Image (spheres, grey):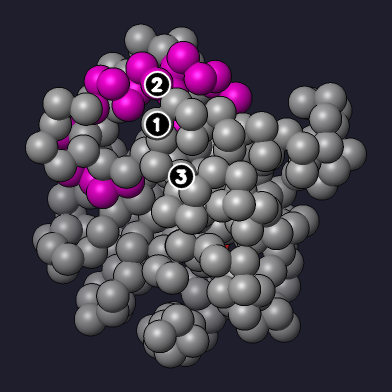
């Protein structure tokens, strides 16, 4: 299991300082919408300049018509990020078009799809998708698998079920992690700790606030990494 640290801080310089403090750590860094819109695409090379073995997950959650998504995916690949994501609700044709567009590249990035956002509870999810989180998530995961995607973003509680219905090598990346179970949930509704993430065979855990709001983020990351060995 890999740790992906969410760089969700309010200023670029804060994200850069956080990344610098984690320079020696074997972590992935998640660049989200806020940072990408505010700081621009150069944020990727700035992070790689700190440590070129940092792997970058560009969490832009693409959702558009197939050709526009594939155009965006091609531009993302040119940034040399290792992973990015799209919404599974964009549909199988869009996801397949994205994968097809990247298929000729030498080192194409990993493409994941977002199933159900971990901030949804069942009632809110039903109001949008007219289906339970569990049922729709499974459908989205199967659609993504059949479209040739590499994996999904899902909650820890869905990871095992998704692997059972697709393939054990189909990646699950799980936000909503409160590493030791005693932290604040914030706006996340479906949270889990690291032990549960292990039990559910998650490939990546994404952790934001429990790291960057900790008094000593490096200590928090070290403590998490020890449990991943
Ligand atoms: O601070 P926290 O650990 O809750 O951060 C979780 C990160 O994962 C945030 O950057 C959030 O945007 C992202 N995320 C999520 N749920 C998803 C997809 C991404 O929380 N389904």
Q: CA distance from mark 1 to mark 2?
A: 6 Å
Q: Residue at 26% across / 59% down in the picture?
A: 55
Location of residue 186 (image quadrant): bottom right
Ligand 1 has an atom within 8 Å of the beta carbon of the residue at disc 2: no
Q: Is residue 226 above or below residue 110?
A: below
Asked if one can make out residue 33 in the rendered structure from this viewpoint, the answer is no
Q: CA distance from mark 1 to mark 3?
A: 9 Å
Ligand 1 has an atom within 8 Å of the beta carbon of the residue at disc 3: no
* Crowding at mark 3 (Cα within 10 Å: few <14, some 14-19, many 20+): many
30 sits to left or right of 78 = right
The magenta segment is 78-102
Front residue of 6/96: it is 96
Front residue of 84/19: it is 84
The image position of residue 208, as x and y in percent, is: 52, 64
Disc sitting over residue 151 in the figure: 3
The reply to whether the C-beta atoms of the residues labelled 1 and 2 are less than 8 Å apart is yes
Q: Residue at 24% across / 46% down in the picture?
A: 81
Q: Quadrant of the N terminus?
A: bottom left
Q: Residue 43 lies in magenta, yes or no?
A: no
184 sits to left or right of 152 = right
32 sits to left or right of 143 = left
- Nearer to us of marks 1 and 3 is 1
- Label 2's element? helix
Q: Residue at 60% across / 52% down in the picture?
A: 164
Q: CA distance from mark 3 to mark 2?
A: 13 Å
Q: Kindly identify which residue carries mark 1.
A: 148
Disc sitting over residue 41 in the figure: none
Disc sitting over residue 96 in the figure: 2
Q: Residue 91 lies in magenta, yes or no?
A: yes
**Outermost residue, right side:** 123
The image position of residue 156, as x and y in percent, is: 64, 60
Q: Is residue 78 above or below residue 91?
A: below
């Amino acid at each position: 299991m890999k740790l992906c640290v969410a760089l969700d801080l309010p200023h670029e310089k804060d994200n850069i300082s956080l990344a610098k403090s984690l320079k020696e750590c074997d972590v992935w860094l998640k660049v989200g919408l806020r940072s990408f819109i505010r700081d621009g695409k150069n944020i990727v090379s700035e992070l790689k300049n700190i440590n070129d073995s940092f792997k970058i997950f560009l969490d832009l959650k693409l959702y558009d018509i197939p050709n526009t998504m594939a155009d965006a995916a091609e531009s993302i690949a040119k940034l040399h990020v290792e992973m990015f994501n799209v919404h599974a609700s964009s549909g199988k044709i869009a996801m397949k078009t994205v994968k097809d567009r990247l298929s000729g590249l030498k080192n194409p990035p990993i493409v994941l799809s977002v199933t159900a956002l971990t901030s949804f509870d069942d009632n809110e999810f039903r109001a949008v998708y007219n289906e339970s989180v569990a049922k729709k998530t499974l459908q989205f995961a199967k659609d993504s698998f059949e479209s040739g995607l590499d994996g999904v973003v899902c909650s820890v509680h869905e990871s095992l079920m998704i692997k059972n219905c697709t393939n054990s090598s189909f990646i699950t990346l799980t936000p909503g992690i409160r590493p030791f179970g005693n932290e604040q949930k914030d706006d996340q509704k479906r949270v889990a700790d690291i032990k549960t993430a292990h039990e559910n065979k998650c490939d990546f855990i994404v952790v934001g606030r429990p790291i960057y709001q900790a008094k000593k983020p490096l200590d928090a990351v070290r403590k998490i990494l020890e449990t991943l060995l």
